[in-house]
Amino acid sequence: MKSLLLLLATATHFAPSLVLAKQPCPLYGPLFPKPSSSSGTTLLQHPAVKSAAASLDEIFPRYIDNDNTTGSSHFSYSVEVFSGATDTPLWTHYWTAPNLGGFNSSGVKKVDTNTVYRIGSITKIFTVLAFLVSVGDKVWNEPVTKYLPELKKLAEQTPGGSMMVPDWEEVTLGGLAGQTSGLTRDYALLGELSYEAPLDALYKIGFPPLPLEEYPPCGTVPTCNREQLFAGLAKLPPSFPTSTTPAYSDISYALLGYVAERITGKDFKTLVTDTVLKPLNLTHTFTSKPDDALGIIPGNRYSTSWAFELAEEAATGNMYTSAGDMSALGRAIMRSTLLKPAVTRRWLKPSVFTSDPKSTVGMPWGIRQLDIGFNQSFQITHAFNKLGSLGAYTSLLAIIPDLDIGFSILAAGDPPAGLAMDIADTLTATYLSTMTTVARTEADRLYSGQYRYTGNITVSIPSSNSSLPSNSSSPFQPPKYTNTTLPSTRQRLNSSLTISTSTSSPGLIIKNWISNSTDMSFYAVAIGSNITDEYLDKIKPSVRLYPTGFEEPLPDNKPGKRVAFKAVFEDLSLPERKPGMQMGTDCATWVGVTGVVYASRPLDLFVFEVDGEGKVRGVENGALRVVLDKVG
Ligand SMILES: *[C@@H]1O[C@H](CO)[C@@H](O)[C@H](O)[C@H]1NC(C)=O
Ligand SMILES: *[C@@H]1O[C@H](CO)[C@@H](O)[C@H](O)[C@H]1NC(C)=O
Ligand SMILES: *[C@@H]1O[C@H](CO)[C@@H](O)[C@H](O)[C@H]1NC(C)=O
Ligand SMILES: *[C@@H]1O[C@H](CO)[C@@H](O)[C@H](O)[C@H]1NC(C)=O
Ligand SMILES: *[C@@H]1O[C@H](CO)[C@@H](O)[C@H](O)[C@H]1NC(C)=O
Ligand SMILES: *[C@@H]1O[C@H](CO)[C@@H](O)[C@H](O)[C@H]1NC(C)=O
Ligand SMILES: *[C@@H]1O[C@H](CO)[C@@H](O)[C@H](O)[C@H]1NC(C)=O
Ligand SMILES: *[C@@H]1O[C@H](CO)[C@@H](O)[C@H](O)[C@H]1NC(C)=O
Ligand SMILES: *[C@@H]1O[C@H](CO)[C@@H](O)[C@H](O)[C@H]1NC(C)=O
Ligand SMILES: *[C@@H]1O[C@H](CO)[C@@H](O)[C@H](O)[C@H]1NC(C)=O
Ligand SMILES: *[C@@H]1O[C@H](CO)[C@@H](O)[C@H](O)[C@H]1NC(C)=O
């Protein structure tokens, strides 16, 4: 009986021109190990990193600073590219607007790594991080009413909510952090017209005059106090039922700040200072306006918003930081300095979709899918971004954890619209390929080569002749293991493999995988695929290794470590799916992970032994249970 697989393969003979070879489908995650932290200096010296820096040194002055069409005389900016592998930035650039001197400003005269800018909504990253450090993420599904009595009261007044009243019992803490609370953007502070324009002018353009008590009693000047804020919240209709669609909400973060205060007993500013700023030694980061002399103030202290205090809404946008500190924050997130790695892994995931399939929303991230390249589909990674904007200040923090890099972009003055994102796009275009090259060449240097069984060590061989009692009622009896020594004088176990990398395809590529004289690549693919006999000789096996994130020290305090990779076994002879067929996918190798085990050990597990000097000594396949030494 022909399998579906074979039918597909046959069908392709009739329309060969439509058929594209199947592309490798990596597991989601880094395609190569991150360049390790011990190679921080190596990273800075890497030719690709130096060449990226040299080209940016040329591009930024030419296309931004000295280009008289960009308006660069009216804005200043600090940009840094950082890596989790080293505290030294990979590249920095600071530009001071020539017009800054004309403002008689009480701030800095020249911007650098320590210059303090307002960061607006990047504050939300500090809010979530402080929350995760002090409370954790186990409470994300709890209702906000559990912590804020004012909202509990509102919930009791309108149980279940309505079109005009949020269903407060269903508004969760995770919903507040992940922008799925369904709440509106803000109360009175941002977007409230009656605070942004004279009422007369509003009437003229068609807004109706209202009784005075209908207008918020507070907003920007003065800002609302806590009581006014909750009174206002009682009047604001929700945008959506919870978890319907992302809707950016500043007020959600103000509420999250209140919840953090309630749980920890510390006010928001103290909480952020104690849990994030002090532990990370962020000496140029502030929850309230610092000394003017530390910051860039491109004009009047108030009209630039330098001195504007968001008060009750501090948790959503009141903070100040420098490029150097923002880089340190990004590194700390990627290194999981303040959180357990498992919490960081949960944090750096999307919480909801958007209409752009390449763009999702996290806490408080805007997440972008980035195509890594190789001229193929399926090689993607994600950047976790947060933009901030307040008065004369625009900022952006981006991290790309899979590549272990990030960008800090801070601008002040009168920049062209989209400057921060344009800079981020330029840096991404440069560093995606740079860091992929670095990771690949580093992986190539470490892992590529020949591996062969060289020992006469003792291996475990299952004996098919069980000596278990024959009266056992179970038809399945565990095999009995005996240890057999293969003396070096007899035939040495014929097992070997080679590893390489390619600039045009992902992962560590395994070729010539022989186990005890057998072509193991072929069987690994065939066993996992349930294919018919006729099709067997058409298989084009592909075996690639991807990092799992598992690393552990060698036993007995030996210097070095064991590093685990997962293999993906694919048959690249299969055709691509027909265009227009939307339910299937050509890239679902995650479903096949560890589809084949031999006596409880995965055939797709490869564990490398790395010695104290960072040299790869050998590799052991989980199922095959022999160490192949790296011999070349
Ligand atoms: C394997 O394929 C055959 C047909 O080729 C089918 O009858 C059988 O159910 C398949 N087994 C599994 C586990 O999919
Ligand atoms: C911008 O520079 C170009 C070339 O240096 C010059 O021709 C042009 O007049 C300048 N424009 C302005 C507005 O200064
Ligand atoms: C500049 O600022 C200082 C202090 O803020 C003030 O005393 C001085 O008058 C200002 N100078 C001008 C020209 O505005
Ligand atoms: C904290 O940073 C400052 C510089 O901003 C530095 O002088 C100081 O040594 C650092 N402290 C620690 C404990 O790293
Ligand atoms: C991608 O394709 C272009 C043009 O076909 C080629 O110049 C480039 O080298 C390719 N890149 C990689 C990484 O293979
Ligand atoms: C292989 O066997 C020889 C002789 O029995 C022994 O001297 C040697 O140590 C063994 N090598 C290993 C790696 O076990
Ligand atoms: C198991 O052992 C019995 C007796 O020692 C022998 O007759 C039989 O052939 C063995 N079976 C296998 C599969 O080796
Ligand atoms: C089966 O073997 C066990 C020992 O392994 C023994 O205790 C038991 O009595 C045996 N049962 C029968 C029915 O022979
Ligand atoms: C086989 O050898 C390993 C160590 O190499 C030992 O731990 C195990 O007990 C041995 N098994 C048997 C059945 O002798
Ligand atoms: C190697 O394969 C032969 C059969 O071809 C088998 O008898 C032997 O036990 C195998 N040895 C190992 C160590 O796998
Ligand atoms: C090992 O096995 C491979 C594949 O069967 C074979 O081509 C090769 O000659 C063998 N090598 C030795 C030394 O037996």
Image (spheres, helix red, strand yellow):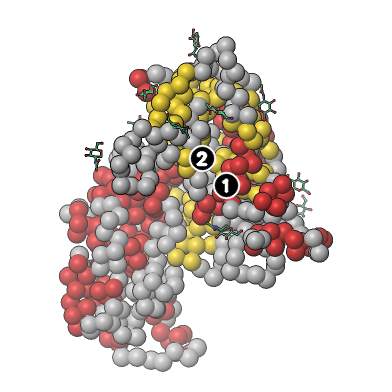
Q: CA distance from mark 2 to mark 1?
A: 11 Å
Q: Position of residue 65 (x, y in %)?
A: 65, 47
Q: Position of residue 559 (x, y in %)?
A: 42, 19
Q: Position of residue 62 (x, y in %)?
A: 70, 45
Q: Quadrant of ligand 10?
A: top right
Q: Who is closer to the viewer here, 393 or 481?
A: 481
Q: Is residue 172 left or right of residue 627?
A: left
Q: Is residue 612 left or right of residue 166?
A: right
The residue that mark 1 highlights is: 527
Q: How many marks?
A: 2
Q: Who's the residue at 33% across and 62% down the image?
A: 174
Secondary structure under the numbered disc 1 in the rendered image: helix
Q: Is residue 33 visible?
A: yes
Q: Who's the residue at 31% across and 91% down the image?
A: 211
User: Tag 1 or tag 2, which sits nearer the N-term?
Assistant: 1
Q: Residues within 10 Å of mark 1 (few under 14, many from 20)?
A: few
Marks 2 and 1: which is nearer the front?
1
Name the kind of residue labelled 1 in the image: Ile
Secondary structure under the numbered disc 2 in the rendered image: loop
Q: Who's the residue at 61% across and 47% down the image?
A: 526
Up-down relation of residue 239 to residue 301 (above or below): below
Picture quarter with the C terminus: top right
Q: Who's the residue at 50% across and 29% down the image?
A: 620
Picture quarter with the N terminus: bottom right
Asked if ligand 1 lies within 8 A of label 1, the reply is no
Labels 2 & 1 near each other (Cβ < 8 A): yes
Up-down relation of residue 618 to residue 422 (above or below): above
The residue that mark 2 highlights is: 603
Q: Quadrant of residue 450?
A: top right
Up-down relation of residue 628 to residue 121 (above or below): above
